[in-house]
Image (tube, rainbow, N blue to C red):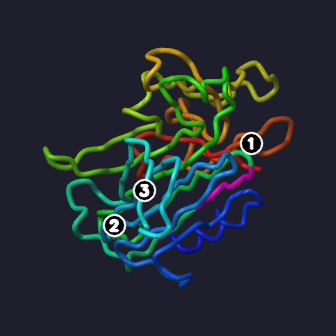
Amino acid sequence: MVAQIRDKIASMANWTLTEESTAGTDAFSSSDWAVFETPTGSYVRLAIVSDQELELSHGLEWDTENSSWSDQYSNSWSCFPVNGDNYQSASMDSQVRWWIEYVDGKGFAFVATREEGDGLDEAMAMGFSELTRLWDYTTAQVRESKYTALVVGHKEDEYGDRITQFSATFEGGASSGTYHGKGEVNADGNNDNYPMVETTLQGGAKYEDALIGEHDLWIQDDSGDRSAHLDTVTDGGADKFTIFKEGLPSPVGIRMD
């Protein structure tokens, strides 16, 4: 799965596969990783940090001579698609079903579901989206990234296993405020009277509550039991988002292009 996601990301016109630990093989092993240069000149690394845990990290400079970050934003996040109390039971051989959206100029988002049928199956979602900046903070004294991340799933912390959801890759910590684009199913199929807010507004990490950008690669589904897993959100007959619910601690809609 990870090798195929690597190939999808690398196939985008303005994304470059900078370095990888696998030497182009068709399978990833534990501790393998791939680093991509984004269209804006920063870098993102997708890595397997254990037999069942994926990690996203982000920075301004990747050192190919030493295969390490030379300038990394302070955040990195990981999660895995298995039951939070029994994650040790997963392995690289687990059967996984996955979906991915990847758009040059936007980024990528994917959902993976473990499908072993042993009572431990859960799902995870990851994404990395370029922000449409609301103001030019690139030359400010306190830097902010041009990207934001989607990480939804299970993760182990020092207190044990927990469900976690993050949505920022900014220097110095998580975003001070993220205002998700949201959608609900239309209760009246004859009228477009339940508008969907597609844009997710991103708050900064260093600029406190300042809004610094927006994106529309994923949204948060607030329909509750009125929407189902893999429902498609349409607009005038055009597919817009696929809703993913099963196994996720928080349902998300991934854009369709």
Q: Residue furthest right?
A: 236
Q: Which residues are magenta?
A: 99-104
Disc 2: CA contacts within 10 A as few (<14), some (14-19) or many (>=20): some
Using the numbered discs, state the Cα–Cα distance from disc 1 to disc 3 in whole angstroms: 36 Å
Horizontal and vertical percent position of residue 134: 67, 21
Q: Amino acid at mark 2?
A: Gln
Using the numbered discs, state the Cα–Cα distance from disc 2 to disc 3 in whole angstroms: 23 Å
| 137 lies above or below 172 | above
| 198 lies above or below 49 | above
Report whether 95 appears left or right of 100: left
Q: Earlier in the sequence, mark 2 or mark 3?
A: 2
Snapshot quadrant of residue 173: top left
Residue at left 53%, top 63%? 35
Q: Of 107 and 245, which appears nearest the observer? A: 107
- Which mark is on residue 52? 2
- Which mark is on residue 34? none
- Which mark is on residue 69? 3
Q: Of 191 and 24, which appears nearest the observer? A: 24
